[in-house]
């Protein structure tokens, strides 16, 4: 399975032509902070601690769950920090693996 297949599995309903744009939005969001993997189905990404980044992350999460309903996103702001928690079902761990690779590579 290639990275693109893992990133956009058959369950994704986003038109193929729009996928590179969505990936670029994720890459832009992942330019700072750290990445943690609390468990195989959960990814935690530290973001820039700004209201603009939190709003961008929330908007992207809403759009992403419209085409890939297996994702659950939570934007958490606490103690002057912003993070994005991403969870998936067991059968979509490979998609989370690809997202983690993108998040790590965007730094």
Image (cartoon, rainbow, N blue to C red):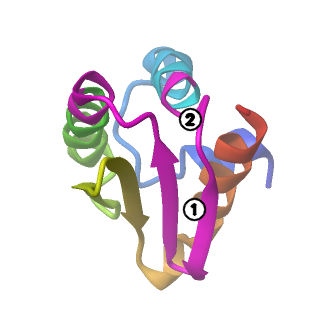
Q: Residues within 10 Å of mark 2 (few under 14, many from 20)?
A: many
Q: Nearer the viewer, residue 68 or 41?
A: 41
Of residues 5 and 85, the one nearer the viewer is: 85
- The x, y position of residue 70, in whole percent, is 33, 64
The stretch in magenta equals 28-55
Query: What's the CA distance linking mark 1 and mark 2?
Result: 14 Å
Which image quadrant: the C terminus? Answer: top right
> Which residue is at a point 64% across and 43% down the rendered structure image?
103
Any mark on residue 30, and which? Answer: 2
Q: Secondary structure at mark 2?
A: loop
Camera-side residue: 51 or 70?
Answer: 51
Residue 63 as seen in the image, left or right of residue 22:
left
Question: What's the residue at 20%, 30% (across, down)?
Answer: 55
Q: Choose top left, top right, bottom left or bottom right for residue 24.
A: top right
Dot 1 falls on a residue whose secondary structure is helix
Residue 54 in the magenta stretch? The answer is yes
Q: Which mark is residue 96?
A: 1
Q: Residue at x 58, y 59 (%)?
A: 95
- List x then y, in percent, for residue 37: 61, 73
């Amino acid at each position: 399975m290639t990275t693109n297949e893992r990133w956009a599995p058959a369950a994704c309903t986003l038109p193929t032509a729009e996928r590179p744009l969505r990936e670029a939005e994720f890459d832009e969001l992942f330019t700072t902070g750290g990445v943690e993997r609390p468990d195989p189905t959960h990814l935690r990404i530290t973001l820039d601690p700004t209201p603009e980044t939190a709003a961008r992350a929330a908007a992207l999460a809403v759009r992403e769950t419209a085409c890939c309903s297996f994702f659950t996103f939570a934007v958490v702001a606490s103690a002057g920090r912003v993070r994005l928690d991403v969870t998936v079902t067991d059968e979509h761990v490979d998609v989370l693996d690809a997202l983690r690779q993108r998040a790590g590579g965007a730094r």
